[in-house]
Amino acid sequence: PGKAKDKIVNVGKSIKKLGKDDPRRVIHSLKVGLALTLVSLFYYLKPLYDGFGMSGMWAVLTVVVVFEFSVGATLGKGINRACATLSAAALGVGSLHLSSLFGKEGEPIVLGFLVFLLAAAATFTRFFPKIKARYDYGVIIFILTFSMISISGYRVDSLLEMAHQRLSTILIGGATCIFISIFVCPVWAGQDLHNFIASNIEKLANYLEGFGGEYFQVTEDKDSGGDSKKDKSFLQGYKSVLNSKTTEEALANFAKWEPGHGRFLFRHPWKQYLKIGALVRQCAYQIEALNSHLTSDMQTPPEFTRVIQESCINMSSESGKALKSLSSAIKSMKHPNSATQRVENSKTAVNDLKAALEAAAIEDSDLLAIISAATVASTLFEIVECVEKISESVH
Amino acid sequence: PGKAKDKIVNVGKSIKKLGKDDPRRVIHSLKVGLALTLVSLFYYLKPLYDGFGMSGMWAVLTVVVVFEFSVGATLGKGINRACATLSAAALGVGSLHLSSLFGKEGEPIVLGFLVFLLAAAATFTRFFPKIKARYDYGVIIFILTFSMISISGYRVDSLLEMAHQRLSTILIGGATCIFISIFVCPVWAGQDLHNFIASNIEKLANYLEGFGGEYFQVTEDKDSGGDSKKDKSFLQGYKSVLNSKTTEEALANFAKWEPGHGRFLFRHPWKQYLKIGALVRQCAYQIEALNSHLTSDMQTPPEFTRVIQESCINMSSESGKALKSLSSAIKSMKHPNSATQRVENSKTAVNDLKAALEAAAIEDSDLLAIISAATVASTLFEIVECVEKISESVH
């Protein structure tokens, strides 16, 4: 019983954490409940029920399937569903007429053949990456509606009335979803994408700002050795950036459906975000390579450390600061003036180091010992280049 | 008109390419068509129609929504749908009984409240990453079925008969999907995951095998300069590995649903694949860092090149060969004996280089000039380590 209690407490904790991490999740759950309750009025209120009958069920179905976390996803699904239902209904009615030309015997055969043909063709289009990304749901609904109409139309006589009722309830369900998702605490995918990119840049910035001190062990808290562990989380933050591609692409796809909101206009250049995201990932890969040298146990000879330490710390912290000001510039949507200066600073540091390396004549020094530190320096060169590219693309 | 013709030709070409790249796509499309046609027999054949009536529609709906590309995905959705429908139906009937205790006035209010509560709670569980990964569809169907039953039950009198008809048609639809997906040219997600990992390792292997020659420009086809461009595609192959995480996780999730097939037993250790995949990605990040030095225009002094060239080429090609034999060992599911030897070889090369670097006393050499080559060497150290880890985890 103690174990079961522990488990319940754990589940409770993770529920609380989930809600605290992003309170919009709780709100979203309530919104779905609200939309369903609104739609179920179709059944409870007699006058409405008399109008729609069992078709009210389709409004419920639509709400459950269409309502998504962000406005973009909801709109995308709603529009997909509406367009697919309309076009499939038209085609379905057409194919019913066509098949009726073949007589009582031929009708089901022709209908079956048409369903087979369209379902196979539509399923195949789902493999196109572009259709998969934006219209996947629409294609499914298309197949669904077309086969339902052409199959059940064979038995149901009041087809047009049924189609009319179903269409209007689907529209009502979809409209309810879209209305609630836009006007009750909306979650904009575009805004999310914007913040996601900014916070990814910030994660890299945190790493770079801290890296110099960490690598050369010039931490101020030398006395309190045990205490230094707690603030090393910044060294792990960048890892989530490595796999950010899928999230970014999904958000950008949703954002394309959204109308203008806040500081974003309709047709905001969402593709630009994907470009920045790719550059940021590029930078994160370099940081990953850098990171493997943090734990290296090779001792760099102090004479070499003296040559590179200052400019390496400068490169790393200046490019980190450049990223930080880029990130806050993105957040406030202002022109990143200070970032340009920081990038210049880090480029100066690169040149300093290059000059120092050229000048440094280390006599019969152990090349193996300096190789790790040299790699750090050269990876930092690459990072400065990346940061410059990011800075350019943000403008 | 010429333009429109071009477009049509282009679309035709991309359809052909899509089908050629993976002929299973065409077969899958035909399978969906077949399943739909089978299920539509419910309508066309009079005796069956008399048994199920309009509920036959639910079989169509189930087929369209449940049928997925791989067996695992189809099974997962089918099982999710069946379990969710059953539990939601039980809960729905229960809540109908409960609400009927509150009299004609109170019933819709209590029902509405219950729908709101359950929909909100179930929607919230969708935010748990584990539930999202494996049971997302089940939760949606749960909400759908529960609200439909508790809402329409308020109006429909023959509730139990309706529920019975609907359940059996859903089961028939789901069973049709599962049957066809398993017995007609099955696509196993587990097999796909297996091949995916093996081909990713091979991509890295191709890169590493070619890298040494590429970096030190010791290509044999010096004479035919124009011809050398065509075989450089191996330098790009590794890029797709960088973003492989999502695909691997999705495939592993599907694979968990699959029964034993071919050389895979049920409960095959799919998690192990994810671990190998993560290590492979780690290696790909290092290769990405390596790759930025291929285009570097810095001239390495020949005296330094002489020191590192042989062992660098050895490290790179031996670790490439190690990966290649790992990949083919995975493909044939045999013990990778030769890989161990290759890993040993590459470790020897690492030690050779380390010794050479220690011995090499390059007098007043330009440190800046050698830094890029030194980075290549040190990154290759890391790669050899990665390859060793991959080799260990494959065993």
Image (cartoon, coloured by chain):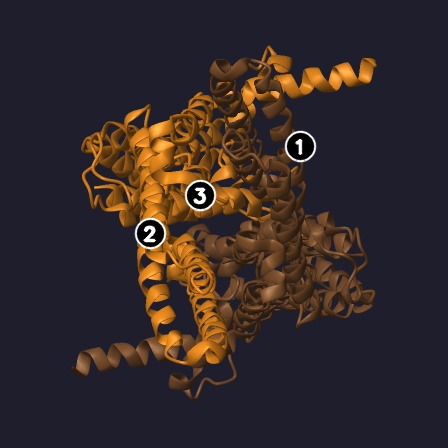
Chain colours: A brown, B orange
Q: Which mark is residue B40?
A: none
CB-based contact (under 8 Å), mark 1 and mark 2: no
Q: In which quarter of the image is the C terminus of chain B?
A: top left
The alpha-carbon separation of the residues under discs 1 and 2 comes to: 33 Å
Q: Is residue B374 above or below residue A345?
A: above
Q: Nearer the viewer, mark 1 or mark 2?
A: 2
Evaluate whether residue B342 shows in this view.
yes
Q: Which of marks 2 and 3 is nearer the N terminus?
A: 2
The x and y percentages for residue B108 are: 49, 73
Evaluate whether residue B300 shows in this view.
no
Relative to residue A288, is residue A47 drawn left or right?
Answer: right
For the residue carrying disc 1, how many other residues have a C-alpha within 10 Å: few (<14), some (14-19), or many (20+)?
A: some
The kind of residue tagged 2 is: Glu
CB-based contact (under 8 Å), mark 3 and mark 1: no
Q: Is residue B303 above or below residue A59?
A: above
Chain hosting mark 3: B
The alpha-carbon separation of the residues under discs 3 and 1 comes to: 37 Å
Task: Say which element carries label 1.
Answer: helix
Q: Name the residue under label 2.
A: B161
Q: Mark 3 points at which residue?
A: B247
**B334 or B72: nearer the viewer:** B72
The kind of residue tagged 1 is: Ala
Q: Residue A90 carries which label?
A: 1
Chain hosting mark 2: B
Q: Is residue B17 above or below residue B163?
A: above
**B222 or A282: nearer the viewer:** A282
Task: Say which element carries label 3.
Answer: helix
